[in-house]
Image (spheres, rainbow, N blue to C red):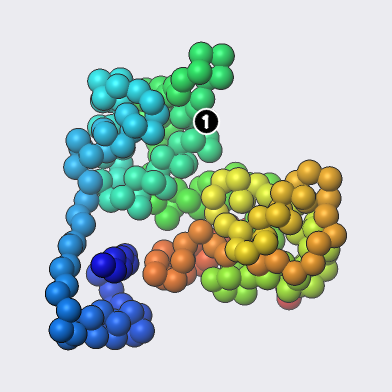
Amino acid sequence: MVICSYRDDGDELPKALQETIDAIKESDNDTTTITLGAMSYSDVQALLADSLYSSQNDVEALSHLVVNKTAGNPFHVHAFLRFLHTQNLIYLDTSQGRWRWDTHRINQQNITENVVELMCEAVQKLPEQTQHILKYASCIGNTFDLNILSIICDSSPSQIAKDLWPALKDGFIIPVGEGHQLLQEAEGSGSNSNSNSLSPSYNRNRRMSTQTMNRKALLIVDKVSF
């Protein structure tokens, strides 16, 4: 059995993906298409209860807030919860060994319901140097190499890795191959490792989200001459 999944944003699918889907449907093999819609309130409540190690009653108010802000869109739910965590609006109380949140405080934050704007607000909270480097990285494309980025920014790959660490921790970029090792070494004692790649957390199956993020990121940081 082979399971294939992709994100359908309602726009035209990439040509290679569409040709693959058509070929599978036209084959002699039995195929089943399952379209996943928005998460229901009970889905979100179960997700939060499981993720936060809490009872469903404890997460009831938070579940309503998340559904109201995201309309149950799984990608939006993930982005919204990640934003709340990075802003310490959901945090781990190490003294009690449990997750805590304050729905009243979250409501007072006047958090936008537009997830792209939400992510851009989070980018603006990154260190200025991190924003500066992300601007160049977004110009390179969906995947960027630390060596190329270091040449553009006139810096060493290890220093670029250090500057990108806040973006990695907040989930804006993810390491590819041995990139994670370089980032960990750079965060610790500094590393002179060579070529490594990083790619934005949005892959090409989310092309519109990636492109929109890149354009908005360019507007967030100060204009730089190449």
Position of the C terminus by quadrant: bottom right
Q: Is residue 132 left or right of residue 110?
A: right
Residue at 26% over, 34% down: 46
Dot 1 amino acid type: Asn
Position of the N terminus by quadrant: bottom left
Q: How many marks?
A: 1
Using the image, determine if residue 115 lies above or below residue 32. above
Image coordinates of residue 124 in percent, x first then y, are 58, 49
Residue at 45% over, 23% down: 99
Q: Is any atom of residue 159 visible in this view?
A: yes
Image coordinates of residue 112 in percent, x first then y, are 38, 44
Disc 1, SS: loop
Image coordinates of residue 192 in percent, x first then y, are 85, 60
What crowding class fits label 1: few (fewer than 14 Cα within 10 Å), some (14-19), or many (20 or more)?
A: few
Q: Give 220 or 207, whichever is nearer the viewer.
A: 207
Residue at 65% over, 47% down: 166
Using the image, determine if residue 16 lies above or below residue 85. below
Q: Give 21 or 28, whichever is nearer the viewer.
A: 28
Residue found at the very far front of the displayed protein? 1
Residue 107 appears in which quarter of the rendering?
A: top left
> Which residue is tagged 1?
88
Q: Is residue 5 left or right of residue 132?
A: left
Q: Is residue 202 left or right of residue 148?
A: left
Q: Is residue 139 left or right of residue 72?
A: right
